[in-house]
Image (tube, grey):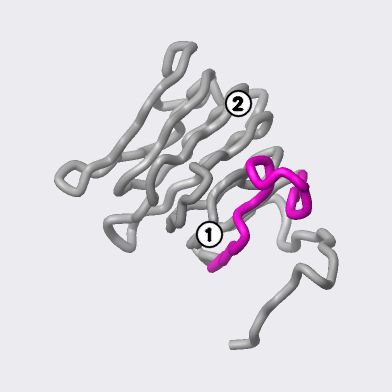
Amino acid sequence: MLRNARSYAHFIFPDGHHKLIGLLSKPLEIEGVTYIPGNLTLGGPISGRGILYVPNGSVRILDSLKAVDKQTLIAIVVPNGKIMMPPNARFKIDAALSARDSIIGGEAVEINGNLLVRNLNRHTQDRASSMPKTVHINYDSRIRNRIANKVYGSIGKQLVLWREL
């Protein structure tokens, strides 16, 4: 995706900082691949089926990203940047998230989708550069990887909580 995203994108934003905010009366609609070469500020209700691809910038989430219906399926991909939240935020994010570093900032986040990161920064001294204290991930089984059936990784036992359904 990193190499060919711009070629296959449905929408290409110019370089710079962009702000996409959905409203209850007019949710942010994401369809297909949206290529955003700069930084992105994002928030509010979302709808559609698509990918926000931010290859060289970071994403700042200002408000919960709530899907308006069950057909909404959104991915936010930030391969070389960060996904950031305000320090005291408690957000719900209905999307799959992929970034180099884990979500930074906030008190709590509930992700209904998936979280894929290269660096899971749970234990840093500076709260401003750490993940939220509470992170809940509810995997959305509609998200599939067509390249592999299994994903492998490791995480310290002291960080893992789960329950069998």
Q: Which of marks 1 and 2 is in front?
A: 1
Residue furthest to the left in view is 25
Tell me the tag on residue 55: 2
One can see residue 158 in this view = yes
Camera-side residue of 68 and 108: 108
- Which image quarter holds the N terminus? top right
Q: Earlier in the sequence, mark 1 or mark 2?
A: 2
x, y (%) of residue 95? 47, 52
Residue highlighted by disc 1: 108
Q: Residue at x 70, y 47 (%)?
A: 117
Q: Is residue 41 left or right of residue 148?
A: left
Mark 1 burial class by Cα count in 10 Å: few <14, some 14-19, many 20+: some
The quadrant in which residue 133 appears is bottom right
118 above or below 35? below
x, y (%) of residue 75? 50, 45
Write the start and end of the magenta stretch as one range: 119-138
160 above or below 45? below
Q: Residue at x 74, y 54 (%)?
A: 122
Q: Is residue 130 left or right of residue 46?
A: right
User: As shown in the figure, which amino acid type bears the numbered disc 2?
Assistant: Pro
The quadrant in which residue 99 appears is top right
Q: Which residue is drawn at 58% across and 24% down?
A: 57
Numbered label tally: 2
- Asked whether 134 falls inside the magenta stretch, the response is yes
User: As shown in the figure, which amino acid type bears the numbered disc 1?
Assistant: Ala
x, y (%) of residue 149? 71, 62
- Asked whether 106 falls inside the magenta stretch, the response is no
Asked which secondary structure carries label 1, the reply is strand
x, y (%) of residue 115? 61, 54
Q: Is residue 151 left or right of residue 18?
A: right
- Which image quarter holds the C terminus? bottom right
